């Protein structure tokens, strides 16, 4: 039995390594997609779009391995949480890579249009911030650092602020007739992609926190809802005609 | 194969032979699949030699199914995404080596900053394989600078020459004196442009050559007043205000004309890339041993990737815009060389859309050194 458990933990470590590697590919894809957008690099866009297939495949492989371990080993407690969290983290990573592909596709749509320097600066900042969030989230996952994982949500507010600033700036640029409507719409969508990548990084942080502590932020709301349900069961509302 | 690679190859082969001879004990030492070289064979003199190599070496011991790394390669197994990607590429390449023989791959990691690695793998006698990882970022950068320089130089010199030839050709068949006048004016304009490039190239080579004979104690304030004065006309044309804020009278030891030219170059750039109504600030800040001169604008700013390259000769952030802003593409290169000559440093902080600040830090001379003018007054 000891030997079996050892094999299980080796498998688990291997899956964790795969998650870190998939994460590294996503961390790499963010600045690449930004460079594609800012330099109008169509070749780079094609490369990233094609590379996404590999990320999809690796994500599916990770999930398959997790399902296999769940079925064969029937893990409990911390081990079970690890596998469940990894399944979720893997899909967050895969979705983030898709968003990088979406940035590349937007770059194709606005190819040939100049982007206002203020907007370019903000795009660079959003990209940097989204990448930093992912670096922190995967670092927390790799090093089993629960406080760091819990702090990522707070770090995300800076990216949300940049997103709001960017949208405001698009309106102003459009009012000054410095930007086409088509480009403005595409860039607004691109900003949303960065903001979503940040949200996925926050989810990775939350899932990391869950696998270490068993707690997710939704637990608070869920507990509130249950308490409310129980109290209404004890004191049913008086029906009036 | 260079001598370096040959020596590394022998060293690797010897280490592997040693590992094979001690395979049982090595495997006993290993607790994980990956271990630094020192942990497993630290008593062998070649282990130290491997660790001293400036490149990463990973040996895949096929029969034991584990990897042995030297110090540099071990440092690449961290959690940073750059390390993870390099490590992943090395493992994939080693796996491929066992199937289809020696491999070579160039790996670019976006970072930031962007880094380039060269990974070569080789099958060894005994069925093991070795991967050699080299960080070639600097090499790639130098190659890019060299290639771009040749391309940009030919662009900057050939464009006006092509223009002059085309204008001259049109002139020979033209009879309308008004058109001839216009063509002649454009030929003169293009000639001045070329002459400007040649002048800048000559002054750059003079500055690169080193110290001139005109070195003397120079007051930073007077240099800046002169540099600002030279740019006032341009600033008025662009409706940009230049604000000069000086601290006391810091002195530096150097070539006054070079310093004026360098600082006026910085101020001119700040004005050219500012929109009408904006402000350019020129400030000084003194320290015990240095004086910091900063030139800040509220212009279009410089993208992070370009900030590393703007001091290269003929480097243009936006070639399309360079025609409208003018200049020879050598200005910032001259500035950097002047600052280097004076033992100083130059840096840039910028974000696209919010402006740029160029900061020049020069070593000050002791206060007791007087300027020539002051010395002259005392003598009188």
Image: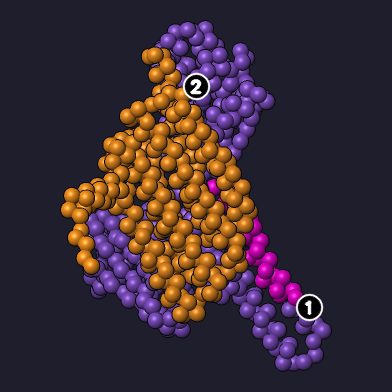
Q: Residue at x 36, y 49 (%)?
A: A202
* Residue at image location 22% in from the left, 50% down from the top: A233
Q: Is residue B220 visible?
A: yes
| Quarter placement of the C terminus of chain B | bottom left
Chain colored purple = B
Q: Which residues are magenta?
A: B138-166
Q: Secondary structure at mark 1?
A: helix
The subunit carrying tag 2 is B
Image point (56%, 17%), residue name: B62
Judging by colour alone, the chain drawn in orange in this rendered image is A
Tell me: residue B345, above or below residue B9: below
Q: State whether the magenta stretch is mostly helix, strand or loop.
A: helix
Image coordinates of residue A123 in percent, x first then y, are 45, 61
- Does residue B44 appear anywhere in the picture? no
In this rendering, the answer to whether B282 lies above or below B348 is below
Q: Residues within 10 Å of mark 1 (few under 14, many from 20)?
A: few
Q: Which residue is mark 2?
A: B67
- In the image, B296: left or right of B172? left
Query: Does A46 appear above or below B135?
Result: below
x and y, in percent, of residue B146 in the image: 59, 51
Q: Which residue is mark 1?
A: B169
Locate residue A109, reporting x and y percent: 60, 64
A217 to the left or right of B60: left
Whether the magenta-drawn stretch holds residue B143 is answered as yes
Secondary structure category for the residue under label 2: strand
B279 in the magenta segment: no
Taking depth in this image into account, of B156 and B339 the one nearest to the observer is B156
Q: Are marks 1 and 2 in contact (CB under 8 Å)?
A: no
Above or below, B260 relative to A41? below
Question: How far separated are the C-alphas under marks 1 and 2?
Answer: 70 Å
């Amino acid at each position: 039995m000891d030997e079996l458990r050892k094999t299980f933990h080796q498998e688990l470590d291997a899956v964790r390594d795969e998650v870190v590697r998939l994460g590294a590919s996503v961390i790499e894809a963010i600045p690449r997609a930004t460079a594609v957008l800012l330099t109008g690099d169509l070749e780079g866009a094609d490369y990233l779009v094609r590379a996404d297939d590999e990320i999809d495949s690796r994500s599916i492989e990770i999930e398959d391995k997790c399902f296999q371990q769940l079925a064969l080993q029937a893990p409990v407690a911390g081990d079970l949480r690890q596998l469940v969290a990894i399944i979720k983290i893997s899909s967050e990573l895969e979705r983030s890579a898709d968003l990088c592909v979406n940035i590349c596709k937007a770059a194709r749509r606005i190819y040939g249009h100049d982007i206002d320097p203020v907007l370019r600066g903000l795009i660079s900042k959003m990209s940097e911030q989204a990448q930093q969030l992912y670096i922190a989230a995967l670092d927390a996952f790799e090093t089993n650092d629960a406080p760091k994982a819990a702090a990522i949500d707070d770090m995300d507010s800076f990216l949300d602020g940049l997103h709001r600033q960017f949208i405001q700036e698009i309106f102003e640029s459009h009012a000054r007739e410095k930007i086409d409507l088509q480009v403005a719409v595409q860039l607004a969508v691109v900003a949303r992609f960065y903001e979503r990548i940040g949200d996925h990084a926050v989810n990775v942080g939350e899932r990391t926190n869950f696998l270490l502590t068993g707690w997710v932020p939704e637990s608070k709301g869920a507990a509130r809802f249950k308490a409310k349900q129980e109290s209404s069961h004890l004191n049913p509302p008086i029906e009036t005609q | 194969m260079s001598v370096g690679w040959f020596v590394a190859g022998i060293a690797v082969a010897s280490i592997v032979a040693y590992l094979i001879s001690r395979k049982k004990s090595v495997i006993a030492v290993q607790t994980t699949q990956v271990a630094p070289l020192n942990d497993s064979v630290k008593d062998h003199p070649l282990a130290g030699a491997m660790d001293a190599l400036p490149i990463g070496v990973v040996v895949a011991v096929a029969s034991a199914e584990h990897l042995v790394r030297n110090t540099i390669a071990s440092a690449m197994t961290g959690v940073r995404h750059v390390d993870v990607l390099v490590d992943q590429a090395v493992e994939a390449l080693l796996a491929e080596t066992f199937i289809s023989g020696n491999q070579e791959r160039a790996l670019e990691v976006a970072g930031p900053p962007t880094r380039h690695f060269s990974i070569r793998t080789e099958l060894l006698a005994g069925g093991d394989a070795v991967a050699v990882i080299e960080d070639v970022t600097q090499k790639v950068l130098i190659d890019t600078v060299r290639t771009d320089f040749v391309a940009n130089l030919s662009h900057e010199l050939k464009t006006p020459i092509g223009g002059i030839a085309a204008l001259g050709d049109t002139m020979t068949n033209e009879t309308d004196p008004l058109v001839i006048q216009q063509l002649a004016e454009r030929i003169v304009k293009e000639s001045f442009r070329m002459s400007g490039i040649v002048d800048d190239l000559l002054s750059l080579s003079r500055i690169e050559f080193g110290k001139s004979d005109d070195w003397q104690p120079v007051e930073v304030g007077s240099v800046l007043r002169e540099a600002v004065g030279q740019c006032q006309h341009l600033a008025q044309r662009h409706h940009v205000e230049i604000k000069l804020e000086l601290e006391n009278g810091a002195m530096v030891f150097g070539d006054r004309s070079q310093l004026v030219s360098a600082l006026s170059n910085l101020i001119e750039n700040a004005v050219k890339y500012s929109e009408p109504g904006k402000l350019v600030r020129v400030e000084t800040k003194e320290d015990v041993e240095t004086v910091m001169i900063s030139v800040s604008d509220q212009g279009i700013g410089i993208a992070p990737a370009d900030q590393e390259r703007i001091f290269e000769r003929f480097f243009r952030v936006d070639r399309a815009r360079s025609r409208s802003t003018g200049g020879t593409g050598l200005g910032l290169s001259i500035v950097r060389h002047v600052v280097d000559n004076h033992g100083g440093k130059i840096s840039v902080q910028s974000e696209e859309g919010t402006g740029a600040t160029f900061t020049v830090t020069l070593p000050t001379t002791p206060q007791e050194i007087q300027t020539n003018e002051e010395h002259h007054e005392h003598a009188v």
